[in-house]
Image (tube, rainbow, N blue to C red):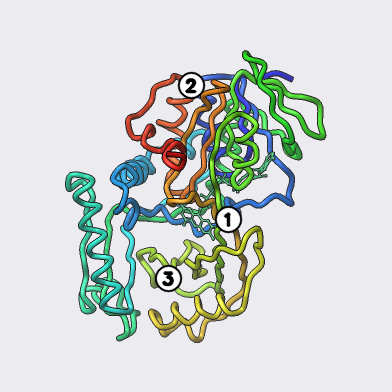
Amino acid sequence: MSYEYAVIGGGIVGSCIAYGLTKYSRQVAVLDEGDIAFRASRGNFGLVWVQGKGWDYPAYADWTWQAAAAWPDLAAELLETSGIDVGLSQPGGIEMCLEDEELSSLEDKMRRISEHTDGGFHYEMLDHSSVLQRVPEISKEVAGACFCPHDGHVNPLLLFRALHQGMKQSGAEYLPNRKIEKIEFSGEEFRISGDFKDIHAARIILCAGLQNQVLGEMVGIRIPVIANRGQLLITEKVRPFLKYPTLHVRQTSEGGLQIGDSSEEVGLNDSTSNSVLSMLASRATRIFPMLENVQVVRAWAALRIMTPDGKPVYQESESCPGAFAIACHSGITLAAAHVGPVCQWIAKSKLNPLISQFSSDRFHV
Ligand SMILES: Cc1cc2nc3c(=O)[nH]c(=O)nc-3n(C[C@H](O)[C@H](O)[C@H](O)COP(=O)(O)OP(=O)(O)OC[C@H]3O[C@@H](n4cnc5c(N)ncnc54)[C@H](O)[C@@H]3O)c2cc1C
C-alpha cells in the first residue's frame, strides 16, 4: 500500500495531524500500535491551558496563546465534519495558591508571559476575597489565585472520537495494530515495516509519543523524550458548583470532578500509587472542603511526553527530507495549532515563524 502521507501514531497529536492533512491530500494513512501502547491521549486532564506556559520561552507563550484562541473554530469545524460536540468551554481558568510564596512566584511568571505576548495575554491576580467572589466554595486556606480568561477545557475523549471520525470522513485511513519496527528512506520514499505488509509513503510524520525517540533515529531526527507520570482521581457526580476549570480540579459537564496535576519521573511505569493519590486528594480538599464527603470512583495514571525543556518539538529531518517529528506534553491545548499551522508547514512547506523556534536542534548545540 502506498500513501502520500503516513502518520505514525494515532493519539491526539497524530489524529490532529491526519485530520489537518486531509485538507491537502486524499492519501493519508494513520498507522497505530495496539491497545498495549502507552497513550497519553486516553488519560489526560482535558484542559486548554495557557496560563503559566512559556514564561521562560517567549515563542511557547505565543504559540500556546494562539492555539487556545483558535480552539473555538476547531470545535465548530469538528461539530460540522464529525457531528460530535467536543464540549469546549472557555470561561477562563483559575490556578489556586495555598501559600503566599506560591502566589508571588505565579504572579512573576504571568507578568513575563504578558510581556512576551505584547500584552495580548491577559490575566488577573486575585486575593482571597476576590477568589471567593468567583468560587464561593473555597476554604480559608486559599491565599489567592490567578484568573486567565484564555483558559478552558474540553472532553478529551470526545475530542479524540471527533478527530478520528472527522479524518475518516475526510478520506484518511486508520490502520490499527501496526507497530512500526523499521523505517527506510530510498531517497524518494519511505518504506515502513513491522509485523504487517510493508507500507510506502512519500512523507511520514512521527507522532508516536514516547516512541518518537527510537523511530526518529531511523530517519535522522534526534528527539529526546522523557516519560512523566501524571495521576488522576475521578469522583462521583455532584451538583454543578465549579464554573471555572482550575489547574488541580475541574468539574466535567456530567458533574464528576477530575482531580490531578501530579508529576513524577518513574520511567515507563503507568501504575498509580497511594502516596500520590492521597496527596492529590489532600490538596483538593484543602481548596474545597466540601470534597471531603465526595466519593472517589476511579483513579488512573498516564505518561506525559516530556522534552528536556518541556516545550514542543517540530522537526523535519535533514538527512531524510519528508520525515517530520512532533512531540509535546500539551496536545489538547495545542490541537488547533496542530490541525492548522503545523499541517500547513508539512503540506506546503509554509514555515510559521513560531514553528521554527521549536526545532530539536536546541538540544544538540
Ligand atoms: C495525566 C496527564 C494529564 C494531561 N493533561 C493535559 C491537559 O490537561 N491539557 C493538555 O493540553 N495536555 C494534557 N496532557 C498531555 C496530552 O495528553 C498529550 O500531550 C497528548 O495526549 C500527546 O498525544 P500523542 O498523540 O503525542 O501521544 P499518545 O497519546 O501517547 O499517542 C502515541 C500513539 O503512538 C502510537 N505508537 C507508539 N509507538 C508506535 C509504533 N512503534 N508504531 C505505531 N504506533 C506507535 C501509540 O499506539 C499511541 O496511539 C496530559 C497528559 C497526562 C499524562
Q: Quadrant of residue 167?
A: top right
User: For the residue carrying disc 1, how many other residues have a C-alpha within 10 Å: few (<14), some (14-19), or many (20+)?
Assistant: many
**Residue nearer the viewer, 94 or 107:** 107
Residue 227 bears which disc, if any? 1
* 140 with respect to 335 (left or right): left
Distance between mark 3 and mark 1 Cα atoms: 34 Å
Residue 25 appears in view = yes
**Residue nearer the viewer, 116 or 141:** 116
**Residue type for callout 1:** Ala
* Residue position marked by numbered label 2 in the rendering: 347
Q: Earlier in the sequence, mark 2 or mark 1?
A: 1
User: For the residue carrying disc 3, how many other residues have a C-alpha within 10 Å: few (<14), some (14-19), or many (20+)?
Assistant: few
Report the number of discs.
3
Residue lying at 63% horizontally and 51% vertically, measured from the top left: 39
Q: Quadrant of residue 241?
A: bottom left
Pointers 3 and 1 in contact (C-beta within 8 Å) = no
Residue 240 bears which disc, if any? 3
Residue 76 appears in view = no
* 309 with respect to 3 (left or right): left
Mark 1 CB near ligand 1 (8 Å cut) = no
